[in-house]
Image (tube, grey):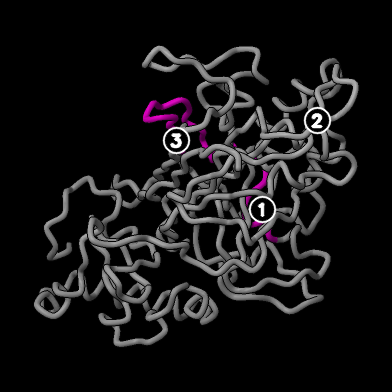
Amino acid sequence: MTWLDLPADTPFGLANLPYGVFVRDDDRPRVGVRIGDSVLDLAAALDDPTFARSSLNEFLAQGRARWTEVRSRVRELLTDARHRDAVTPLLVPLAEVRLLLPVEIGDYVDFYASEQHASNVGRMFRPGAEPLTPNWKHLPIGYHGRSGTVVASGTPIVRPSGQRKAPADPAPTFGPSRRLDIEAEVGFVVGTGSRLGEPVALKDFPEHVFGVCLVNDWSARDLQAWEYVPLGPFLGKSFATSVSPWIVPLDALEEARVAPPARDPEPLPYLRDGDEHWGLDLTLEVRLNGHVVARPPAATLYWTAAQQLAHMTVNGASLRPGDLYASGTVSGPEREQFGSLLELSWAGETPIELPDGGTRTFLEDGDEVTITATAPGPDGTRIGFGEVTGRVDPAR
């Protein structure tokens, strides 16, 4: 039990303790841990300059033993009443801080791990053919994104411009995207790196991945459809990817671990997870202008984060502290579980009806999208992930 006065149902209790970077007034950015609706200033609480930084990268590079040590010390500070007088002044109300991008991201990789999402896209764009491509159940498909346009939650998203060509158009045209979309995803933040040329085995996932965040991989579907053959996503994806400000440590997610769906055919040996169950039972919630439009279940993801990491490095590609990779759109079997407007409106054929009487197929200027999530914690508690939010600004 903590000596703080916390609501019994808070998703940011002692079982969670996510990390982020905050700034207060004109002070310098610092690393903090969220507890309830406050942020504990770690540099001051632990007397450790590692946390007087504008990113978590230095701490991430210290490895799992250090991550465990700091988590244990923070729990002690927040549970042992002897520390109350010393720690209380170091708890900053969330309302008084601005939250920043929590890590300096070196590389960003986005996967395509939801069978339901991949099947939906296949049915929309390849009617009459097999929904999944022949390789989909043999390897986690992904692409390398643009790390420089990964932004903190709350950053406005400028509508991208580029080439687009509908099937009936005689030639491509240039202009603002007419099919701006979202992708509700789960992100994974790398802690300790790896050497170039040395793959990371699936079993070593918890030694390299520090924690989990939420991701909105904004997508311009019309730009993407014209450009992606033969090399894949480019301008339709690279303009912005938003991430939540809190990174929930893997140590907080033991109760959320679940077995992934059955795989058929069996993956190649380096992707076989056996008893290494790293499916995660996260329930995401997508709000458009305050209205809930979807609740995607991450437990349905076909490829786990551990398999994604193993595949991403099997060719010898190295990891660095702060690298980010994401699951791809999370979608469940029911329409209300689809994690993109592309699916919710079925490529624009069935507009989404909003409670205020409006409709949407894709995003309009001024729209705001917020993605939240929770996961099971110990003793019936829930683990919160904060939120990732973005508002669409007009093209420039």
Left or right: 13 with respect to 199?
left
Q: Residue at x 69, y 76 (%)?
A: 194
Q: Is residue 178 above or below residue 145?
A: above
Kindly identify the amino acid type of the residue bearing the numbered disc 1: Gly
Could you tell which of marks 3 and 2 lies nearer the N-terminus? Answer: 2
The answer to whether mark 2 and mark 1 are in CB contact below 8 A is no
Report x, y in % for residue 162: 74, 39
Dot 1 falls on a residue whose secondary structure is loop
Magenta part of the chain: 284-309
- Give the residue pinned by disc 2: 173
Q: Residues within 10 Å of mark 1 (few under 14, many from 20)?
A: few
N-terminal label among 3 and 1:
1
Q: Nearer the viewer, mark 2 or mark 1?
A: 2
Q: Quadrant of residue 145?
A: bottom right
The x and y percentages for residue 209 are 57, 65
**Residue 274 disc label:** 1
Mark 3 residue type: Glu
- Disc 3: which residue: 368
Label 3 packing within 10 angstroms: few (<14), some (14-19), many (20+) = some
> Disc 2 residue type?
Thr
Q: Is residue 208 above or below residue 153?
A: below
Q: Is residue 317 magenta?
A: no
Task: Name the quadrant of the C terminus.
Answer: top right
- The image quadrant of residue 224 is top right
Helix, strand or loop at disc 2?
strand
Structural distance between the alpha carbons of marks 3 and 1: 41 Å
